[in-house]
């Protein structure tokens, strides 16, 4: 990378954290807004990554979004995938990871967009199958508010980075004024080539190659050994010693790494933590402060969704029934998303809806099911006033209850929806036969059942 690229990464990502604050310029006069991303986001992290641990990989979500309701209202799907032990580079280059996580992620890409807007954890279970059928993927919805609780120190340990930012800015200015002219005066093409040749990563390769005269006899010796190799038995003393020595070296390197990281972290907090205590970093611009969850109903896009609770037709009703039933789902298998995709393509109404409109419907339904589940449920008969739409919706509910891995709570809630829709239809027919009686447009759930459902919704 050249100087401009390195400077951009350091100033906008590593030090300034400007990407999360929406301060990174994309073109003159415009900035990158992560909230404007409409395609699903997949986050792959590992507990064994000591460079970008899971908390750091996921904290940007808490910086950008104020609540679960905002994620849903923005129509965003965020999927997190967590590995237990692979290291930082292993996430990208490990063959074991490529066979499992990479393969499952690629297979899931076609179906992730069918997930309702929200925050999910992708889980994988090994099966008796082979190839792409070896693992079964599922998606479990989680809340942003619960994700924030994973930060035991409530991110107070990030305070010293405000001092780091100020020190970094000062060092960059000192280098620009004093260091850069000196370096440019000393560096030419010959010294640059010598630096590239003697780079440690290159030296470790050419030092043991034919460029080193001391390695010339190895080529002849290697041919002889290869031609006369005889595998040793498993109980061979030298083979056992080789395995023991290999484990000893590996464990020693891991122990050294842990000590080094602990010493570095301790030194960091002793230096920059003390600077924060003395007032350094007070002028640094703080990160995004999420809005209080108590005011979530006052957000414009949430107010718009709540005001439309009794507006719409068949597409809105299907989206809201899906969101309501999704509140009781434990996890969503990948096969379920494949089935949903087939259903959408076969439906004469839903198949004609654009992706952007489908995302809007899902976002609106997600907010309503999260904040006003009872009102959303009671408004369904009004959305399904057409007999043909009502029958299609009832057929969908019966089909949904027959799917594999549907939870008992989902079946119970689906039965309540069926009774509600059928009851509204009977009430409408009765009103037509008795035009002299005054009827209400809005049909409520019977009081006893409504109260029972309210308790269930508060519980879950």
Image (spheres, rainbow, N blue to C red):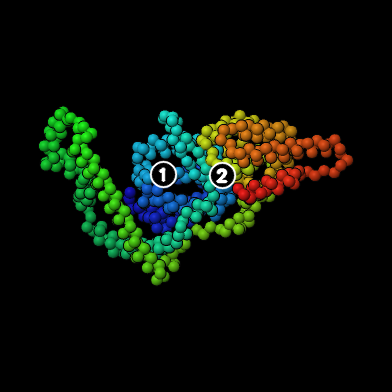
- Residue 115: image location, x then y, percent: 55, 40
Q: Is residue 426 visible from the viewing direction of this image?
A: yes
Q: Are marks 2 and 1 in contact (CB under 8 Å)?
A: no
> Label 2, label 1: how many angstroms apart (C-alpha)?
23 Å
Question: Left or right of 179: which side holds 136?
Answer: right
Q: Secondary structure at mark 1?
A: strand
Task: Classify 222 as above or below 363.
Answer: above
Q: Residue at x 55, y 46 (%)?
A: 118
At label 1, counting other C-alpha atoms closer than 10 Å, the crowd grade (few under 14, some 14-19, many 20 or more) is some
At label 2, counting other C-alpha atoms closer than 10 Å, the crowd grade (few under 14, some 14-19, many 20 or more) is many
Residue projecting furthest to the bottom: 278
Task: Classify 66 as above or below 44.
Answer: below
Residue denoted by label 2: 117
Q: Quadrant of residue 168?
A: bottom left
- Residue 343: image location, x then y, percent: 60, 31
Q: Which mark is residue 83?
A: 1
């Amino acid at each position: 990378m050249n100087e401009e690229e390195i400077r951009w990464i350091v100033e906008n990502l590593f030090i300034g954290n400007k990407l999360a604050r929406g301060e990174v310029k994309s073109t003159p006069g415009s900035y990158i807004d992560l909230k404007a991303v409409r395609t699903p986001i997949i986050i792959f992290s590992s507990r064994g990554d000591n460079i970008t641990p899971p908390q750091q990989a996921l904290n940007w979500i808490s910086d950008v979004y104020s609540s679960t309701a905002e994620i849903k209202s923005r129509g965003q799907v965020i999927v997190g995938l967590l590995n237990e032990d692979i290291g930082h580079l292993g996430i990208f280059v490990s063959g074991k990871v490529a066979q499992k996580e990479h393969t499952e992620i690629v297979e899931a890409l076609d179906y992730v967009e069918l997930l309702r807007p929200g925050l999910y954890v992708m889980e994988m279970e090994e099966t008796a199958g082979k190839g792409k059928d070896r693992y079964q993927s599922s998606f479990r919805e989680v809340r942003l508010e619960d994700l924030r609780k994973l930060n035991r120190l409530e991110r107070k340990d990030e305070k010293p980075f405000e001092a780091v930012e100020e020190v970094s800015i000062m060092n960059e200015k000192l280098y620009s004024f004093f260091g850069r002219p000196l370096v440019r005066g000393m560096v030419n093409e010959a010294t640059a080539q010598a630096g590239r040749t003697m780079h440690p990563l290159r030296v470790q390769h050419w030092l043991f190659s034919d460029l080193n005269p001391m390695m010339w006899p190895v080529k002849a010796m290697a041919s002889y050994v290869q031609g006369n190799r005889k595998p040793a038995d498993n109980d061979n003393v030298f083979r056992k010693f080789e395995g023991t020595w290999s484990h000893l070296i590996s464990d020693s390197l891991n122990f050294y790494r842990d000590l080094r990281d602990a010493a570095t972290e301790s030194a960091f907090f002793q230096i920059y933590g003390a600077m924060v205590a003395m007032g350094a970093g007070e002028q640094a611009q703080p990160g995004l402060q999420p809005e209080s969850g108590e005011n979530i109903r006052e957000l414009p896009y949430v107010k718009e969704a709540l005001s439309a609770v009794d507006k719409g037709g068949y597409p809105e009703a299907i989206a809201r029934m899906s969101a309501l039933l999704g509140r009781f789902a434990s996890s969503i298998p990948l096969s379920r998303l494949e089935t949903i995709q087939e259903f959408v393509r076969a439906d004469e109404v839903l198949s004609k809806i654009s992706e952007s409109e489908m995302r809007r419907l899902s976002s609106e339904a997600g907010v309503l099911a999260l904040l006003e589940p009872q009102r959303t449920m009671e408004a369904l008969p009004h959305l399904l006033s057409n007999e043909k739409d009502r029958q299609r919706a009832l057929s969908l509910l019966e089909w949904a209850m027959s799917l594999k891995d549907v939870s008992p709570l989902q079946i119970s809630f689906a039965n309540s929806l069926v009774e509600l829709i059928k009851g509204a239809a009977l009430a409408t027919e009765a009103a037509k036969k008795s035009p002299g009686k005054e009827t209400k447009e809005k049909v409520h759930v019977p009081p006893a059942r409504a109260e029972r459902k309210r308790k269930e919704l508060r519980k879950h």
